[in-house]
Image: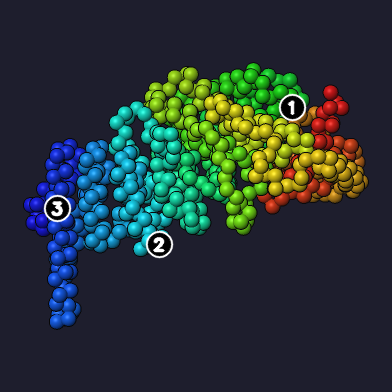
Amino acid sequence: MFEQEVKSLYNSILSDKNCSVNLKIQVLKNLQTYLQEEDTRMQQADRDWKKVAKQEDLKEMGDISSGMSSSIMQLYLKQVLEAFFHTQSSVRHFALNVIALTLNQGLIHPVQCVPYLIAMGTDPEPSMRNKADQQLVEIDKKYAGFIHMKAVAGMKMSYQVQQAINTCTKDPVRGFRHDESSSALCSHLYSMIRGNRQHRRAFLISLLNLFDDTAKTEVNMLLYIADNLACFPYQTQEEPLFIMHHIDITLSVSGSNLLQSFKESMVKDKKKESKPSSDEEAESDSGSESESEEEACKPRKLRKRVDSDSDSDEENDINAVMKCLPENSAPLIEFANVSQGILLLLMLKQHLKNLCGFSDSKIQKYSPSESAKVYDKAINRKAGVQFHPKQTLDFLRSDMANSKITEEVKRSIVKQYLDFKLLMEHLDPDEEEEDGEVSASTNARNKAITSLLGGGSPKNSAAETEDDESDGEDRGGGTSGSLRRSKRNSDSTELASQMNESVDVMDVIAICCPKYKDRPQIARVVQKTSNGFSVQWMAGSYSGSWTEAKRRDGRKLVPWVDTIKESDIIYKKIALTSANKLTNKVVQTLRSLYAAKDGTSS
């Protein structure tokens, strides 16, 4: 076996994909027979040694044979491990036997086999699955941390195994078993890691990082990982809540990058800059084509419309963006490709939310830094909740990445872009209103999610699950109602005293200026004038951060300064958070104030 001729022959047979299956099996059988014979010989040597142990000197007993077995397996190890990715189960079976014998005899360092054993743990044949899983358990007993160290590499390799097994190339590779259990293919791996909180979190974050737009992970692998994340055997509430928390973080970063790259790809010679606040044409009746393009590229909630979500408005938006598309369809394909990762994360979050019965407020309240005991409750899984990311499956089956782009496909991608934009504007859920009603921002977010996920309306009823009942104040009976009434009374008193305060330069204030339709209208006071105040408008949203608003002056963008009357001010001395966002309390107060103002004006 050390001869160059035999070594070249064996390695070429094992590594050549077109080589006969029977030849591959014969080589693996030869290696298996050699290891079995060596094992038998060593057991006999052990029995002989016990008879003469007292007369022999240990220093002179170098086990030359064991060293030779180890050297031989080092020569052929890589090719044997690569045989795990063969389409024929018989080849995988003999390769696994060789590796199991090698590990049992301690001939190689086990860490290099861990990702391959994880991959073999997803084999459709139960006997092979169990054998691979057993090897992992033995390694974990002897070398704590090895499994966690190679877990992500193992997940990627398991995808390669499934690719090899998948006989119908048109069907995307899925990450769960197609039986009654619908369990994740890598569920055994997760169950080994989940006991250690630190290892579990590091593993989950590494998997979610693959969905980042900079990771450039292929779409089918993302689908495979999302399947596993959707079907892992979670036991406590902390596990899915941790995933949903990090999905929100990934969405806010990757979503913004995706929208920005799409905007930059649009034709430059047409006006399409997104204006962050009410524009100077708000009072004019100009209906020019350039203005309609600007309108489409602006956030919907900042437009000069009362009902910006109507079907006709949506159609106008799509047409306006279609006019700005470049002739080269590569950016469109790129957007459709990269957006699949975000769509899968959205779908995964929605699935976990429905599966575990979590409310928006429960997800929002979760903090990874809190004590583990707070979220140590067992999960109440809902029956019959399936993970079915329709859009991504359609994308893979139609092979859109390599297809010719038709006008219809362009329109669907543009619609997806506009839905994404709407979703990003309302990404942070607002707190549910006191009487259990869902806010306009939440409705807008849910509408965007439903549209993006191709139907299947998100379940967002205000009712909490049993698990959430301990999270807040008692929700039942008259006590809760009287608490709400007293809270409203105290809020009214606080608002009245707040409005009696003086307005100083640099204060952030909320305004209800009749000539603009934006909600909310936030500005910073520049100076006091004889008729009121000079203010600089700020751009943002109820849930987003606030920055200086700019307007176009010729070719330059300059700070947007305006004059207002003191009677236009509806809230004084707003304290923004460290992230330049409005606090939940201020958001709720402003919503009520604007609702009252708008109701009076109508």
Horizontal and vertical percent position of residue 189: 41, 49
Q: Which mark is residue 282?
A: 1
With 507 as the anchor, is 351 left or right in this view?
Answer: left
Residue at x 44% of width, y 40% of height = 183
Residue at x 69% of width, y 28% of height = 303
Q: Which residue is mark 2?
A: 144
Horizontal and vertical percent position of residue 218: 40, 38
Examine the rendered structure and indicate whether residue 147 appears above or below residue 42. Answer: above
Label 1, residues with CA under 10 Å away: few <14, some 14-19, many ≥20: few
Three-letter code for the amino acid on which mark 3 is drawn: Thr
Three-letter code for the amino acid on which mark 1 is drawn: Ala
With 118 as the anchor, is 13 left or right in this view?
Answer: left
Q: Under tag 1, what secondary structure?
A: helix
Distance Cα–Cα, label 3 vs label 2: 31 Å
Residue at x 21% of width, y 52% of height = 98
Q: Which mark is residue 33?
A: 3
The image's colour scheme reads: rainbow
Q: Under tag 2, what secondary structure?
A: loop
With 338 as the anchor, is 295 left or right in this view?
Answer: right
